[in-house]
């Protein structure tokens, strides 16, 4: 008896994956030797005709945003960043051959106008880097998502520097842990429950959820009766930038992370402040 072999059908590499990059933080010493301080995650974004690399402030400065002090016990901070940009080849991604872009700390990095309390940073990408094809804005489908506590989200980045598929990120599942309508700790952020790991700081948060604008008859937005038929096709929405876990001393404590809301990215790019830090 002939049997069909097992197979798996697969889709092409998702453009969202192609818009997310690994960032290696480097301390270049006076003798030009280099010390790797670990990795983080960043993503590409468009704003008013320019492209930016967005990540966390603490990834770029190597400092704790609450105190301004270096995060490393030996006080070493990064001054150079190696970023694995994806190489697009004939409308596909050459995952085995990323393009390594190098940025220095003295590049025109920017931060949120409110300062380091909002843990995000960005740097403009040169216009002639035409190998960059995707950004978060170009690949999401909804810009006014309905987000509720308990919703499933994905934190997309490089936990423990993992990039098993060349330079492509891993998609880790999580859920919204705090009421997104209520600012957590009085800041423009909310919390997620996820088993995230070092290396995911700066990861974008994506969700397959519906758009509020297109569905005015959803509960809370209009009359719904027992005869109402609600039909929709979920799309991907950008829900913010992950900023690491809070209040932890080891990997087994409460796995709750902070997410800065999407509008903080627009506020930073629209009213940039030169990267700096304040000791507190």
Image (cartoon, grey):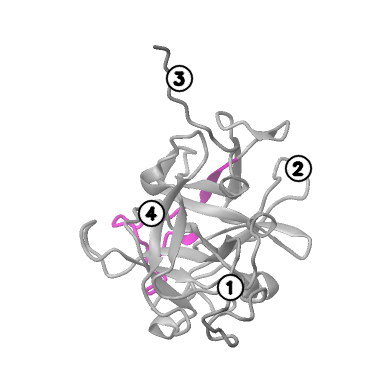
All told, the count of numbered labels is: 4
Q: CA distance from mark 3 to mark 2?
A: 44 Å
Say which of 14 and 66 sits in front: 14
Front disc: 3 or 4: 3
Q: Are marks 3 and 4 in contact (CB under 8 Å)?
A: no
Q: Secondary structure at mark 4?
A: loop
Between disc 3 and disc 4, whose residue precedes?
Answer: 3
| Residue that mark 4 sits on | 76
Between disc 4 and disc 1, whose residue precedes?
Answer: 4
Between disc 3 and disc 1, whose residue precedes?
Answer: 3
Labelled disc at residue 130: 2
In percent of the image, x 57 and y 54: which residue is there?
Answer: 43
| Residue that mark 1 sits on | 229
In percent of the image, x 43 and y 59: which residue is there?
Answer: 62
Q: CA distance from mark 3 to mark 1?
A: 41 Å
Check the image and report above or below for 277 versus 160: below
The quadrant in which the C terminus is found is bottom left
Highlighted range, magenta: 60-85
Q: Secondary structure at mark 3?
A: loop
């Amino acid at each position: 008896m002939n049997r069909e072999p097992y197979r798996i059908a697969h889709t092409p590499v998702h453009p969202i994956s192609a818009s997310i990059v690994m960032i290696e933080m480097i301390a270049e010493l006076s003798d030009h030797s280099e010390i790797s301080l670990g990795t983080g995650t960043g993503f590409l974004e468009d704003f008013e005709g320019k492209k930016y690399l967005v990540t966390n402030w603490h990834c770029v400065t190597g400092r704790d945003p609450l105190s301004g002090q270096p995060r490393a016990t030996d006080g070493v901070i990064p001054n150079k960043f190696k970023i694995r940009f994806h190489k697009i080849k004939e409308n596909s991604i050459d995952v085995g051959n990323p393009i390594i872009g190098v940025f220095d700390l003295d590049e025109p990095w920017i931060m949120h106008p409110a300062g380091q309390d909002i843990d995000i940073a960005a740097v403009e990408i040169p216009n002639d880097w035409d190998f960059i094809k995707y950004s978060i804005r170009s690949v999401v489908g909804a810009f006014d998502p309905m987000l509720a506590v308990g919703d499933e989200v994905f934190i997309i980045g490089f936990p423990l520097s993992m990039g098993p598929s060349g330079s492509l990120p891993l998609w880790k599942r999580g859920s919204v842990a705090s009421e997104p309508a209520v600012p957590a700790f009085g800041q423009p952020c909310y919390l997620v429950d996820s088993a995230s790991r070092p290396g995911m700081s700066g990861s974008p948060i994506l969700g397959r959820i519906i758009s509020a604008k297109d569905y005015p008859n959803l509960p809370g937005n209009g009359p719904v009766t027992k005869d109402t038929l609600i039909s929709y096709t979920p799309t991907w929405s950008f829900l913010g930038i992950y900023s690491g876990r809070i209040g932890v001393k080891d990997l087994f404590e409460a796995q709750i992370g902070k997410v800065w809301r999407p509008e903080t990215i627009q506020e930073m790019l629209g009213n940039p402040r030169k990267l700096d830090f304040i000791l507190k």
